[in-house]
Each structure stands twice: as structure tokens, then as C-alpha cells.
Image (cartoon, grey):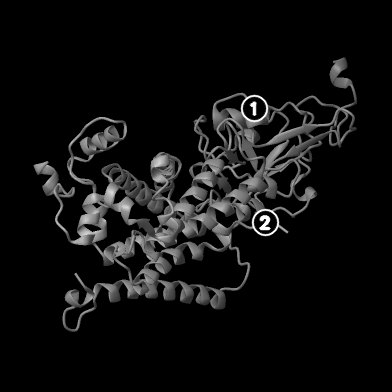
Amino acid sequence: MSDQELKEPNQFSRREFITGVGGMGIGAIFAGSLARMLLLPDDVLAIPASSGYLLVDTKKCAGCTSCMLACSMTHHGQSNLSLSRIQVTQDPFGKFPDDIGIAQCRQCPYPSCVEACPTGAMHADEKTGVRTVDVSKCIGCERCVNACPFTPGRALWNFEEKHAQKCDLCLNTPHWNHEGGPEGVRACESVCPMHAISFTTQIPVQSDEGYNVDLRTGTPWTQIKFDGAVGATGVAGSGLKK
Amino acid sequence: MERQLLFSTSAWLVWLAPFAGIFAAGLTRRREPVIEGDRVLRHDVAARVEHWTHGIGTAVLLVSGITLGLRFTPSLLRDSDAAITWMNVHFVAVISFLFGTFYYAANTLLSWHRFGEHLPTKHAFSFTVQHYGRLLGFKFEMPPEAKYFESEKMAYVMALGASALVVVTGLLKVSAHVATVPAWIMGPATWTHDIATVLMLAFFLAHVFFAAIAPMAWPVLPSMFHGYVSAEHAEEEHAGWYAQLTGKPTSVTPISDDKADAA
């Protein structure tokens, strides 16, 4: 059937209709691109701040890795230190206080991992702002792992389930019967026997010192029978002699 | 400088390609098959553009898609730089594939009878067995072949279904680069994309074998480049189609659903 036969008076022919659809689509895309270019400033990346941050005191940390085990257990149901989203590093040749480091995600205000993710898998949680991974969207390109400016990286590769992962402040802990996240409790913070991990809702100063704080001040040394420490009132060694 | 993913920076091209294909079809004037001396026009320029943009796009999509899919065991990608490179290769192939596919779809809407030429008859399977049985020396009586063999028509339906699945799920995956697509959509879309890829791979390998590697395809293969087959070949291999072009009655009617019922 020819175009002429298809064409009713005052109506488009099939060819005219198809050409029009194609032309309008092309026009709409160019117009949209132009509007976006003119109306939106360059390099705008609006990501809400996280509503919580982990703080650590490496001088208090004993390197027991309880936090790592707790992280792995609560998130994955496995006692696998390599699956932990918080990493304790120890330097056997280092001297106190540089012999232990705690690599916790800083929930950066300008998260490179989120910006680098091509699929939106690494994102800021809508409700809490916590930077976390939507596993179903992760394509395994590891751009987030490379994008994290810290060493060791806080965006990690889950080598068992083959996707990126990072600290979500325990928002999603399927193997833990507690409410996690900024408004709940964090497994690493809960289990640390040295109380070397803490939590704040205030954005820390963006430096190493901003996240590595003094959690010792105010420690009830006398109650824990640790004589001789700063703030202790007893006589050094008296606890042992008694 | 950090390398960019074209799916993120130039996603608009992915949306442009289908409309460019539709628009181009609107401007295209097709030529119907015609006998010109000792040769027959089998594929006009539009058919060849459709075929090669879709076909080359498909080939590169399969290679890059499988490379990206085999990320882990075995791993074909060394690191994230390699992943970005192959994602960008995939992107370029997507543009070609989408243009070719939508150019074909719009052209088909404009000349609907071409779609009918590709659809298998009710007896597609038995005629396919007979067709290849005859090549092996068995004696079968069957109607003269039309422009496309029944086996090609069955493969066409499979390719059509696989292409539709790849396009729909692929566009959803591209959308995830520029907008928030819910995980309950992305999960099934990813799996469907993978399954459609396997179907497409099966079709592609069979198509390349029967249309280019097998010696019986060699006489007709050049027509995919210059458009023509020899009249002798058309009369011998596609007698039903040739008879339609000449307008002369044949001793045996060509294959169509109605005629196949009678056969």
C-alpha cells in the first residue's frame, strides 16, 4: 500500500508520521542537552551529608580486631577479617603510637566513591545520608575502590560475593538483631573492649586528627584498677600490692 | 586525568540513536527487488545499512558484553581501566546497534510486506528438514523457496525476540547511569539482558556459519555488500521468489502459509 493510499484528508501519512517522530525525538534530545548545558552549572554534585561518623582513638586500640570480626559477622555472618569494612592495621616494627592504625570510612562530605560509581550503586542513603552500596546495581568495575583517596581504601572489594562494599554504619546488618545506622548502634563500636571507637553526628574536621580523637580523657582509671595512668588517683602499683 | 565512562558522559547519544534511525527511515526511499539483466537486486541500500549497522553492532556488543560479563571466573579484565575501556567499546557498539535496529523497525513499518517475507510458515520446521535433507541428497518434494528459507525465517523470529529484550533491558541499564532506577527493576533487567545475550550469541553464530562460512552461502554472500545475486542463483535457489519477480507462473507455487497447507 502506498503512502498516498494511506493518507486521509488532513491526516499524516505513515511516512510523515514516522519522519516526524524521528525528527521530534532528535529535536527533543538536542533541546534537552542544550537546556541542561545552559541552565545547570558545571560539575554540580549535590550529595547530602551523612548523619553520622565513626571516630577512633588509635592510642587506645589494642589491635584485638574484635571490631573487624563484629563487622564481618553482622554483615556477612562470617568470621572473616577480609570481609570487614573497618580495618585495623598493625606495624610490627612501629613504635607506639604509630604501631596501630584504624581505617574506618569517613563518610566523606564529598565522597569520591559515590562520584566515581557509573551506575549509582555507590550512593548516599536517602534517609540517613550514609554512603553505602546498592549491591544489585554494582557492576564490579571497582572504580569506587580506586577512587577512595585513603590507604587502605575504605571502599572495599567483596571477593566472595563479587561486589563493592563499605561501612554503612550498620544500616544493613542481616546477621545482627539490632537496629543499626546513625540512629541505632554500630557493631564495631559496641564490641570494642577498649572503647577505642566512638560515634558522632557532627562532621569531624577533615583531617586525620579530625577522625582520630582522644577517647581516653574521662576514663575511670580507678574503677578499672589501672594505677599510674593520667587522671588516676591511687599510688602506682598499689593495686597489685594490695 | 580520570578516564570517563561514555555511558555516563554521553548517554544522550544512546537516546539519539533510535530517533536518528527512525528519522533516517522516514527519509529513505526503498527499492523493491527487481531483475536487471542477468542479476537480481536482492538487498537495496537501506537493507544493507540496516544489516551492517545492526550486525556489526551486535558482534561488538557480544564481544564486549561477554568480556565485561566474564569479570571474575574466568576473568577477562585485568583491572578497572580495562573495564572502562570495554564499557566504552560497548557504548560505541550500542549506538550502531540501536541506529540499525530502529532504522530497520521504522523501515518495516513503512513497508509492512517485508515483515511478512520474514515470518515462518506453519510448516517451517518440516520444510527446513526437507531443505537441508535435499542438500544431503535425500529426495523431498516441496514448494519452491521464497526469498528467505524457512530456517532463516525461524532464526529471524528468535533474533527479533532477543533484540527486543536486549534493547529494552539495555536502555534500562543505561538509564541507571543518569537516573535512579529501583533495584527491583535493575536486578531482573540485568538477568534478562544476560539471557538475551546468550540467545543472540546462538543466533549470531548460526547466522555467521550459514550465511558466510558454509560454502552453500558463498554465491549469495556478496549480495550483502553490493545488493545483487545472479539471476541464475535466484532461479535455482529461490524459484518461488524469482517467479514472483518475473510474473511468470511456476509449475509449483511458492511457499506461503496458505500454499504450505496445501503442500
> For this view, does A12 lie left or right of residue A20?
left
- Give residue B260's position: percent from left, percent from top: 14, 44
> For this view, does A226 lie left or right of residue B145?
right
Q: Is residue B46 above or below residue B240?
A: below
- Give residue B20's position: percent from left, percent from top: 43, 68
The label on residue B3 is: 2
Dividing the image into 4 quarters, which one contains the N terminus of chain A? Answer: bottom left
Chain ID of residue with mark 2: B
Q: Residues within 10 Å of mark 2 (few under 14, many from 20)?
A: few
- Give residue B2's position: percent from left, percent from top: 70, 57
Q: Is residue B44 above or below residue A123?
A: below
Amino acid of disc 2:
Arg
Q: CA distance from mark 1 to mark 2?
A: 36 Å
> For this view, does A130 lie left or right of residue B134?
right
Dividing the image into 4 quarters, which one contains the C terminus of chain A? Answer: top right
Mark 1 vs mark 2: give the one in front. Answer: 2
Q: Quadrant of residue B107?
A: bottom left
**Residue where numbered disc 1 is placed:** A69
Q: Regarding mark 1 in the picture, which secondary structure is present there?
A: helix
Q: Residue at x 61, y 24 (%)?
A: A79
**Residue found at the very far top of the displayed protein:** A242
> For this view, does A191 lie left or right of residue B116?
right
Amino acid of disc 1:
Leu
